[in-house]
């Protein structure tokens, strides 16, 4: 399987790359700062490091064309002028539709999961103000995916720890997992995303994930 990974040098993305290669997949790692991946690229014929900008239509289309699936772990800062999470997904969606690639699994956040009283968790009065903007970005990305023709899944973690996979996590479909723990390892998110590629029941779903 050929997998294009956006956000490939972040704490989740770098683990997606490593774990996907270990599973025998061909991996295209896309990002602005992939220089540190070049040595591995040269040593492994199943790995390609692609330096590019996620807002660039031509670069993104080239990275996606011929892939079987796209995994996105796009990040960004918490400032109100950083639109990477939403506009990055918007461009990825557009180029996937051009390339005829259907399956995408992307990292989002707990704020876009359902809340029975307020619609979405980000609408709760007690939702932390510091996460409001980022959650709004994830929600806009969710809207772009919903409006697309793609087979999408959004993985919605809480606080992400820069640690490898334990294989020990719990999930909830469209809602927070129960019991809920406000942390999860980056490696467990990566491992779940790779498993989710083949799980048709997760298409058009938001999946909460956390440590047990």
Image (cartoon, helix red, strand yellow):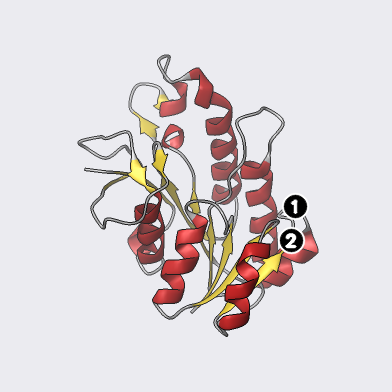
Farthest residue in the top direction? 125
For the point 74% across and 61% down, which residue is it? 52
Dot 2 lies on which element?
loop
Question: Which residue lies at the image location 41% right of the left edge and 68% below the top edge?
Answer: 19
> Marks 2 and 1: which is nearer the front?
2
Residue 107 in sight from this viewpoint? yes
Residue 54 location, quadrant: bottom right
Residue designated by label 2: 52
Residue 117 in the image: state x and y as whole percent. Answer: 35, 21
The image shows residue 10 at horizontal and vertical percentages of 54, 52
- Residue 48 seen by the camera: no
Which quadrant does the C terminus fall into? top left
Q: Position of residue 65 (x, y in %)?
A: 67, 74
Label 2 Cα neighbours within 10 Å, binned few <14 / some 14-19 / many ≥20: some
Instruction: Tell me: residue 167, above or below residue 198.
Output: above
Residue underneath mark 1: 55
The quadrant in which residue 93 appears is: bottom right
Q: Is residue 210 above or below residue 14?
A: above
25, 10: nearer the viewer: 10
Q: Tell me what residue is drawn at x 45 percent, y 20 percent.
A: 128
Residue 58 higher or lower than 40, as above or below: above
Q: Quadrant of residue 64?
A: bottom right
Q: Along the horizontal axis of the image, is 195 left or right of 122?
A: left
Residue depicted at 47% across the width and 78% down the height:
25
């Amino acid at each position: 399987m050929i997998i294009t990974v956006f956000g490939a040098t972040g704490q989740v993305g770098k683990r997606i790359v490593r774990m996907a290669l270990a599973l025998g997949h061909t991996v295209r790692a896309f990002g602005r700062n992939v220089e540190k991946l070049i040595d591995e690229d040269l040593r492994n014929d199943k790995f390609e490091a692609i330096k590019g900008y996620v807002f660039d239509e031509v670069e993104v289309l080239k990275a996606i064309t011929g892939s079987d699936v796209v995994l996105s772990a796009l990040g960004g800062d918490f400032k109100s002028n950083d639109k990477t999470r939403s506009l990055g997904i918007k461009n990825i969606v557009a180029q996937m539709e051009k390339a005829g690639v259907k399956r995408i699994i992307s990292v989002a956040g707990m704020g876009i999961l359902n809340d029975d009283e307020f619609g979405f968790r980000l609408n709760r009065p007690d939702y932390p103000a510091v996460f409001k903007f980022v959650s709004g970005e994830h929600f806009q990305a969710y809207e772009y995916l919903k409006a697309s023709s793609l087979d999408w899944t959004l993985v919605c973690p809480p606080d992400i720890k820069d640690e490898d996979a334990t294989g020990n996590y719990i999930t909830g479909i469209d809602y927070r997992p129960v019991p809920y723990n406000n942390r999860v390892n980056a490696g467990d998110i990566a491992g779940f995303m790779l498993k989710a590629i083949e799980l048709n029941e997760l298409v058009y779903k938001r999946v909460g994930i956390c440590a047990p």
